Image: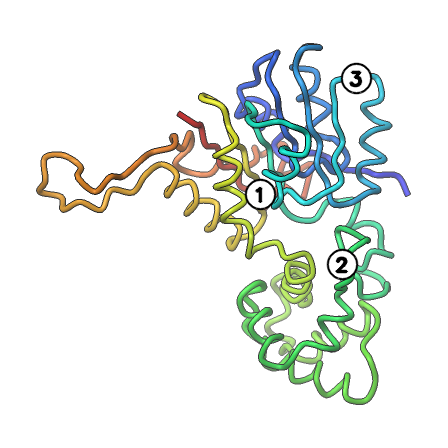
Amino acid sequence: MEFKHEPVMLNECIEGLNIKPEGIYVDGTLGGAGHSSQIIKKISSKGLLIGIDRDEEALEVASKKLKDFKNIKYVHGNHDDIKTLLSNLQIEKVDGILLDLGVSSYQLDERARGFSYMGEANLDMRMDKTQILTAKDVINTYSKEELIRILEEYGEERFAKQIVNNIINKRQKRQIETTTELVEIIKKSIPLSKQKDGHPAKRTFQAIRIEVNNEIEPLFNTIKDSIDLLNTKGRLCVITFHSLEDRLVKKAFKEAEGICTCPSDLPYCICGCKSHGKVINKKPIIAKKEELERNTRSKSAKLRIFEKI
C-alpha cells in the first residue's frame, strides 16, 4: 500500500522550528516524511536531520522518499525514549524537535493494522508491529474496571460502562477478534439518539489505541526531555489531536517556563523558580481554512511551540 500522508500545518511547523542551515533537527514522528521532506531542504550539508519512528514501514518509506539526501539518520524507536536514542547517536543537544502526535493517515487507511472502525480487520492497533500488546489483548484480557477507566479517561466516552458490560458479555462466550465485532458492540451500547455526533466507535477506538501504544502516560516527561535536549534558542514544536494530549503539552510547557509560587505581595521571587524558556504561542495554532477544507485530519490539530533559553 502506498504511504499517503499530508503533513498537518506544514508551513506553520517549518516557521515554528526557526531552522538554522547548520543545525541538528529531530522529527520524532517521521511517518511518511511529510514534514521532514521540507525540514531537510532548509538545512545545509553541514546540518543533520534525525528521523525517529516506531513503525518500520514508515522508516522504509521515508528513506526512499528522502534518498537524495545524505545528512539524515533513521532511527527505529519511540520518541518517548528520545534522550536514549540521541545518546546512542552520540548527540547531546539539538536545535529543533518536531512531534506530530497520534496515528498517521497511512496507519488509519491500511485496514489490516486495525486502527480504523471503517471496514473489517483484526484488532491490532500497534504502531510498532514488533511490540507484543495488541488491541485484541486489551479487549479480551483487561478487567472490567480497567476497560471502563481507559474508555472514560482516554476516550472521554460517556457510555463507557454500557460498552464495557457488553464487551464482557460477548467475550465470555468467545473472543472478540475483529474491528467489526467491536463496532457492533459499541453501536448496541449507545442510544441511537446519541449517535449523531460522528461515528459511535470513534472514542472507544481512540481510547484502545492510546492504551495499546502507551501514548499518554509518558508524554509529559517526553516534552520535558525534549526541552532539555535543545540548544539555546532551539525550538520544540508539538502537534496534538485530542484534548488529553494538548492539556499535557500545555502543562509541561508552563512548568518549563517556570511557575513562581511566591506570594503576590513579594517584590521579587524567593522560591527558586527557574525558567528553561518561553512559550512562543500562548494560544495553540490551528490549521487555516484552506487546509481544513483540504485535509480532514487537521480539524482537531493544535500546534504549540516552546523556545529554550
Question: In this view of the protein, which residue sits in the foreground, 174 or 233?
Answer: 233
- Image disc number at residue 125: 2
The image shows residue 9 at horizontal and vertical percentages of 61, 32
Which quadrant would the C terminus be assigned to in this image? top left
Distance Cα–Cα, label 1 vs label 2: 21 Å
Q: As rendered, which of 253 and 281 lies closer to the eye?
A: 253
- In this view, which residue lies farthest toward the right? 1
Specify the label residue 301 is tagged with: 1
Circle nearer the N terminus (3, 1): 3
Q: How many marks?
A: 3
Return the residue nearer the eye: 166 or 68. Answer: 68
The disc labelled 1 sits on which kind of residue?
Ala
Asked whether residue 199 appears in the rendered view, the answer is no
Residue in view at x 59 percent, y 38 percent:
83
Q: How crowded is mark 2: few (under 14 residues within 10 Å), some or many (20 or more)?
A: many
Which SS class for mark 2? loop
- Please say if 266 is above or below 139: above
Quick one: SS at disc 1? loop
Circle on res. 91 = none
Q: Which residue shows up at 21% across the image and 42% down it?
A: 271
- Return the residue at label 3: 70
Q: Position of residue 6 (x, y in %)?
A: 73, 35
Which is more N-terminal, label 2 or label 3?
A: 3
Quadrant for the N terminus in the image? top right
Three-letter residue code for mark 3: Lys
